[in-house]
C-alpha cells in the first residue's frame, strides 16, 4: 500500500502531520508501506526515512522533492520510478492508497479521479463526494436540499467581485454583522477571518481570495461548536456516528483558526459534549444524513453549531478531516471506543473491500 501526502496547496504541512501519524500507526506486519510525497510544485517523489512530519521550532514540515521521482501510469496500478539516465522501473503493484491530502489537488476529487483511472482502491470518499465536500458553496446547497439546516450565506464569485462589487456588498449586508469570510475551497481554517463592517469585509474577502477566487461569506451564528465523526460500516450496515465533542478555543482566538488547531495548545475538546440526550441523538443522526447526502465513503467529520435556543445548525462536512492522533475526528472515535491504530486499519480494510469502478 502507499500513503500519499503533501500536495500543491496551503495545507501541505497539515497533510504531512497527518501522514506521520498514519505511518506510525500502520501495522507493518500486515501491510508493506510505500511513503509518497507530493512536493509543492506537484512532483511525486519517494520519501526518505529522514522526512520530517512535525512542526519543529515553529517551522512547518514540507516535502523537499529531492527523492526519486514517481509516476502512477493509468490503468496499471503500479508505481514507476523515474530516474534520469535510467529505464523507468516498476516498484510493484499498489493494492490501496491512503491519500492523506487536504485541500485542492488532493481532497477535492482530483487524486480520487486519478486513482479511479489507475484502477487503484483508496481510503475515503470518491470523486463526487470529495469535490462537493471541498466546495463549501455546493456542499451547503446539497445539504439544504437534503433537508438539513444550514446558516445564511452569500457566495462571492470571482467575476462578480471584479465587475459588480457594489451588488455583492449589498447582498452580504443582508446577513448582518459580524460575518465570517472563508475561501470556498480550502480547509484547516486557512484564509478565514471575521469582518465587523464593510472596511473589514473587503480586507477579509481579499485575504480569502489569496487562497481561492471563490469566497463564502457566512452570517455569524451564536452557539457552541459541536463536532461529530462518521465512519463507513462494513457490508450493508449504515454508517456509524461517534460521540459528539465540543471544541472550546481560548480567548486569544475569535474562532477555531489554523493556529488554534495546529500550533500550541489553544483549544480543548470535551467528549462527550454536555448535551441533552435527545440533542446528542439528533446531532448524530444528522451527521449520518450529511454523510449519506454527499455519498461519502470511509470517514468524515461533521461540524455543527448548537444555539442558545436549542437549534442545531450544520456548518460543514470534511471528507478528509485532520488526521493526527490528536486531531478532532480521531479523538472522537477514541472516546467512542475505536483507538487510532484500529481506526487507521478499519479505513484501509474498508477501502480494500470496496469494488472498483462505479458503485
Image: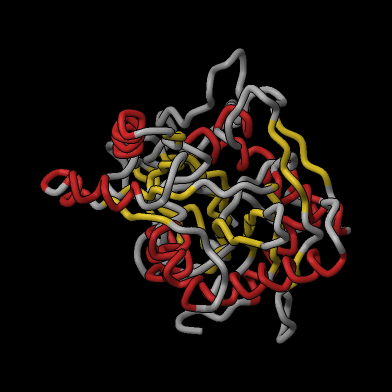
- Comparing 318 with 147, the one in front is 147
Query: In the drawing, does residue 304 fall left or right of residue 155?
Result: right
The quarter of the picture where residue 239 lies is bottom right
Q: Position of residue 356 (x, y in %)?
A: 51, 79
- Comparing 285 with 318, the one in front is 285
Q: Position of residue 160 (x, y in %)?
A: 18, 51
Task: Tell me what residue is drawn at x 68 percent, y 46 percent.
Answer: 22
Task: Tell me what residue is drawn at x 58 percent, y 35 percent.
Answer: 255
Task: Tell me what residue is drawn at x 63 percent, y 50 percent.
Answer: 33
- Comparing 316 with 74, the one in front is 316
Query: In the drawing, does residue 102 fall left or right of residue 26?
Result: left
Task: Tell me what residue is drawn at x 69 percent, y 55 percent.
Answer: 306
Compared to 34, does 94 lie above or below? Answer: below
Compared to 20, does 215 lie above or below? Answer: below
Compared to 161, does 62 lie above or below? Answer: above
Regarding residue 28, the answer to whether it shows in the image is no
Q: Position of residue 96 (x, y in %)?
A: 57, 63
Give the colour scheme shown. Answer: secondary structure
Amino acid at each position: 500500500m502507499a500513503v500519499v501526502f503533501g500536495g500543491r496547496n496551503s495545507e501541505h504541512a497539515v497533510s504531512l502531520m497527518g501522514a506521520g501519524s498514519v505511518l506510525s500507526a500502520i501495522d507493518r506486519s500486515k501491510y508493506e508501506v510505500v511513503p509518497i510525497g507530493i512536493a509543492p510544485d506537484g512532483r511525486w517523489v519517494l520519501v526518505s526515512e529522514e522526512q520530517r512530519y512535525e512542526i519543529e521550532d515553529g517551522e512547518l514540515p514540507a516535502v523537499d522533492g529531492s527523492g526519486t521521482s514517481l509516476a502512477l501510469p493509468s490503468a496499471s496500478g503500479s508505481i514507476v520510478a523515474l530516474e534520469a539516465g535510467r529505464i523507468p522501473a516498476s516498484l510493484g503493484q499498489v493494492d490501496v492508497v491512503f491519500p492523506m491530502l487536504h485541500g485542492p489537488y488532493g481532497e477535492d476529487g482530483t487524486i480520487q479521479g486519478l486513482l479511479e483511472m489507475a484502477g487503484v482502491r483508496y481510503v475515503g470518499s470518491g470523486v463526487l463526494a470529495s469535490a462537493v465536500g471541498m466546495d463549501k458553496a455546493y456542499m451547503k446547497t446539497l445539504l439544504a436540499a437534503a433537508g438539513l439546516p444550514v446558516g445564511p450565506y452569500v457566495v462571492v464569485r470571482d467575476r462578480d467581485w471584479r465587475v459588480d462589487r457594489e451588488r455583492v456588498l449589498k447582498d452580504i449586508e443582508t446577513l448582518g454583522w459580524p460575518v465570517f469570510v472563508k475561501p470556498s475551497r480550502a480547509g484547516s481554517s486557512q484564509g478565514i477571518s471575521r469582518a465587523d463592517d464593510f472596511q473589514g469585509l473587503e480586507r477579509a474577502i481579499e485575504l480569502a481570495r489569496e487562497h481561492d477566487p471563490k469566497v463564502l461569506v457566512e452570517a455569524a451564528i451564536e452557539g457552541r461548536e459541536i463536532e461529530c465523526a462518521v465512519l463507513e460500516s462494513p457490508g450493508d450496515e449504515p454508517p456509524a456516528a461517534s460521540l459528539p465533542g465540543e471544541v472550546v478555543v481560548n480567548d486569544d482566538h475569535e474562532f477555531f483558526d489554523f493556529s488554534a488547531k495546529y500550533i500550541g495548545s489553544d483549544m480543548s475538546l470535551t467528549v462527550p459534549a454536555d448535551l441533552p440526550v435527545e440533542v446528542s441523538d439528533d446531532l448524530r443522526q444528522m451527521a449520518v444524513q450529511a454523510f449519506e447526502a454527499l455519498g461519502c465513503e470511509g470517514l468524515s467529520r461533521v461540524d455543527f453549531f448548537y444555539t442558545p435556543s436549542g437549534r442545531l445548525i450544520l456548518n460543514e462536512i470534511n471528507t478528509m478531516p485532520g488526521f493526527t492522533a490528536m486531531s478532532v475526528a480521531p479523538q472522537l472515535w477514541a472516546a467512542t471506543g475505536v483507538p487510532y491504530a484500529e481506526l487507521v486499519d478499519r479505513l484501509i480494510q474498508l477501502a480494500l473491500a470496496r469494488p472498483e469502478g462505479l458503485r
